[in-house]
Amino acid sequence: MVLTVTGCTADSGGGEVEASCAFEVTYQGRTYRDVANVDFTVTHERGTATTPPCDDTGGPEEGEAEDAEASAYGVKGLPPETAIAVGGSPEDAVFVVSYSGSTLPPEIQELIDRS
C-alpha cells in the first residue's frame, strides 16, 4: 500500500509555481500532522487512518479524488490521542501528532530534544 502525502502549500520562484502537499491524516476523528526528526518505536496496529485528497492546483478537479487509507500504529510511550505512526507497514510508518496551532505537546518536544 502506498500512502500519498496530502495538504497544500505553494512556492513560487522564477515565475513558476511549485505546489506540494503537507502530510496530514485523520484517525478516530482527530487530525494529525507529521513531525520530523523524532525517534520513535512503532507498536501494534490500531486501525485505519485516512488522508484527504490533495488539491494543490486550486482549480476544479476532473472527478472527485477519494481519501486514501493506511494502517495506523501505536507509538511506544504515547497515547493515540497524541501521536500515532501511519504507513503501509511498521517499517515505513511516518510519525504524526495531533495538535493545533504551532506548539507541540510537551511529550513530543521531549522526544525531539532527545533525538
Image (cartoon, rainbow, N blue to C red):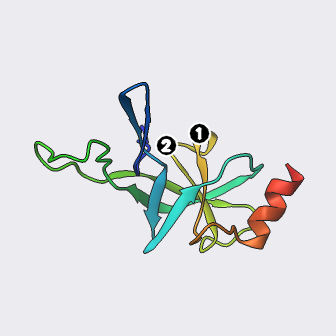
Mark pair 2, 1: CA separation:
7 Å
Would you identify the image quadrant in which residue 93 lies? top right
Q: Position of residue 80 (x, y in %)?
A: 61, 70
Marks 2,1: beta carbons within 8 A = yes
Residue at the far top in the pictured view: 14
Q: Which residue is mark 1?
A: 92
Residue at the far front in the pictured view: 15
Quick check: can you spot residue 5? yes
50 vs 43, left or right, is left
Question: From what the image shows, is residue 9 above or below residue 108?
Answer: above
Q: Position of residue 5 (x, y in %)?
A: 44, 44
52 vs 113, left or right, is left
- Count neighbours of disc 2 (C-alpha within 10 A) and say few if under 14, some if 14 to 19, many if 20 or more: some
Question: From what the image shows, is residue 30 above or below residue 56?
Answer: below
**Residue for point 78% across, 69% down:** 107
Would you identify the image quadrant in which residue 26 lies? bottom left
Q: Residue 88 got which mark?
A: 2
Across the whole image, how many numbered discs are drawn on residues? 2
